[in-house]
Image (cartoon, rainbow, N blue to C red):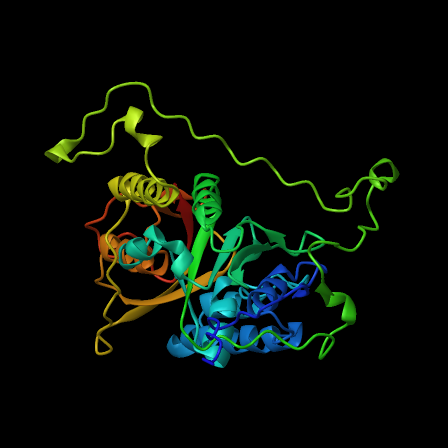
Amino acid sequence: SSSPARLPFGLSPRMVYLYHERQEAALCGQHCLNNLLQGPHFTAGDLADIATALDQQERKLMLEAGMTAEARAFMSEDSSNVDASGNFSIQVLSQALQNVFGLALEDSRRPENRSLMQSPDAQTGFVLNRHSHWYCLRKLNNQWWSCNSTQMAPERITSSGNFSGLSSELRNLASDNWTVFVVKGDRWPQPAPRNQGAPPSNWVDPASPPRDPNEPAEFRGSTFGNAAPRQEAPKVEAFSGQGRSLGGSKRPAPAEVADLSEEEQLAMALSLSQDLAGQARTPSEPIVVDEASPTTTLRVRMADGSKAVIKANHTHTVDQLKRHVASLAPGVAFSLKGGFPPKPLEEGGLSLADAKLLNEVLVFCPE
């Protein structure tokens, strides 16, 4: 007789228990990575070590010009990669996945990822971020699960082999201002054996999740009362007017939207989001530094609270600085503010020296 067909990577004939870390302090970044990888791969100490290494790299860059007043101020500040409660930056999470598993986190809004988002079910995982909270979507046992550490157990968002719910989930998340990162790479670890390397309570049966100790007594008799309530996804209503677009590009008319598949609606939503952002988005182009000419070091406070350290020449223009910052946040429309009180940097043709921005601290403001 013929041998049974092999299941795709990461799947098993019957997977009842899933690895699920629940929220402690502000360690949602750590929980997100471990829930994504389905095992206790990273401790808070591991991620703190990566944050320390990144801090050291930033300090080294700041000290290249010597112990200036700006460097001294930078050295006295707290880490930009982890705070006292354990909230880690995107740089730390990305570095952790890259160092150990060769996996990359890439913003789904980047042009090269648009085709991937047209068939999101072909991916293995997504990481989501909004307001410093991290969680993930992961494909396991030919089903997609939402693994959020604020919930008592993973929540299944698709049935076996039917991935239409995934497109709907991603579309709603994008419209609700969540940043969606695609996890790229093929070195995914196998799910960790149950009860090895972590407390047994970290493996849960989603069909029978553990009781929430903070659950109100009036809900304890209900079947699903122990699960935190899930917010209803925002309803998307088709625009009832008539649109015009420069250049004559054609999009489906409102009456046609309902006839599109979930995947086509997701692709259209992401395309519209990217097009709108593109109207105000600054082209990205990293700065090339001439070490033989005078240099300056600027710090940019990013939207997630981290600080980007940028080295540039005095003669680089404000526009060149903006294009460099755009390369740090692909696909995001933003303004750059400086001074006190902070004001938008509008005179793009001025050099950094003429704009009095040498060694300044700037603020990244998404629009």
Q: How many marks?
A: 0
- The quadrant holding residue 33 is bottom right
Residue 87 percent across, percent down from the top left: 61, 61
Residue at 59 percent across and 62 percent down: it is: 32
The answer to whether residue 301 is visible is no
Residue at 47 percent across and 69 percent down: it is: 94
The answer to whether residue 137 is visible is yes
Residue 148 percent across, percent down from the top left: 62, 54
Residue at 52 percent across and 60 percent down: it is: 138
In the image, is residue 73 above or below residue 102?
A: above
Of 147 and 25, nearer the camera is: 147
In the image, is residue 250 above or below residue 33?
A: above
Of 175 and 319, nearer the camera is: 175
Residue 317 percent across, percent down from the top left: 22, 56
Question: Farthest left residue?
Answer: 247
Residue 111 percent across, percent down from the top left: 27, 55
Question: Farthest front residue?
Answer: 1
Of 189 and 149, nearer the camera is: 189
Residue at 55 percent across and 72 percent down: it is: 51
In the image, is residue 179 above or below residue 295?
A: above
Q: Quadrant of the C terminus?
A: top left
Left or right relative to 180: residue 111? left
Left or right relative to 217: residue 276? left
- The quadrant holding residue 287 is bottom left
Question: Farthest right residue?
Answer: 217
